Amino acid sequence: MLRLALILHIFIGSTLAGVGVIAALVAGINTGLGLFGAALVGFLLAFPASWKVAQALYAR
């Protein structure tokens, strides 16, 4: 299941990192460090999300 979670993290992580950057830009954050921080938060939040999705897919 770890392999499935890591494969899912590729897609979920990039999606949530992009959502974080878009949200930061809408909020008016336009510094490089701020955008990097928003992308990093999205990337880190994708770990538990991809684990939950992998659990749901693996249970089928």
Image: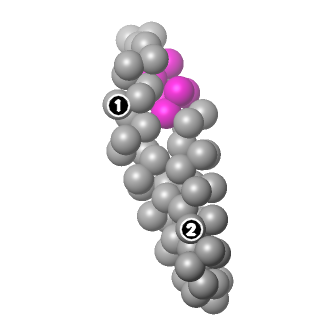
Q: Amino acid at mark 1?
A: Ile
Which secondary structure, mark 1? helix
Cα–Cα span, label 1 and label 2: 23 Å
The answer to whether 31 is drawn above or below residue 13 in the figure is below
**Can you identify the residue that label 2 sits on?**
36
The picture quadrant where one finds residue 9 is top left
Region in magenta: 50-55
Q: Which mark is residue 30?
A: none
Q: How many residues crowd mark 1 within 10 Å: few (<14), some (14–19), many (20+)?
A: some
Query: Which quarter of the rendering shows the C terminus?
Result: top left
Q: Amino acid at mark 2?
A: Phe
Name the residue rendered at 62%, 74% in the picture.
33
44 inside magenta stretch: no
Please tell me which residue lies in front, 34 or 51.
Answer: 34
The answer to whether 36 is drawn above or below residue 28 in the figure is above
Query: Which quarter of the rendering shows the N terminus?
Result: top left
Whether residue 6 is visible to the viewer of this picture, yes or no, is yes
Going by the image, does 39 lie left or right of 1?
right
Whether residue 23 is visible to the viewer of this picture, yes or no, is no
Give the label, 1 or 2, closer to the camera: 2
The answer to whether 38 is drawn above or below residue 54 in the figure is below
Name the residue rendered at 54%, 43% in the picture.
46
The answer to whether 57 is drawn above or below residue 10 in the figure is above
Residue 55 in picture, x, y percent from top left: 50, 18
**Can you identify the residue that label 1 sits on?**
7
Q: Main secondary structure of the magenta part?
A: helix
The picture quadrant where one finds residue 30 is bottom right
Q: How many residues crowd mark 2 within 10 Å: few (<14), some (14–19), many (20+)?
A: some
The picture quadrant where one finds residue 37 is bottom right
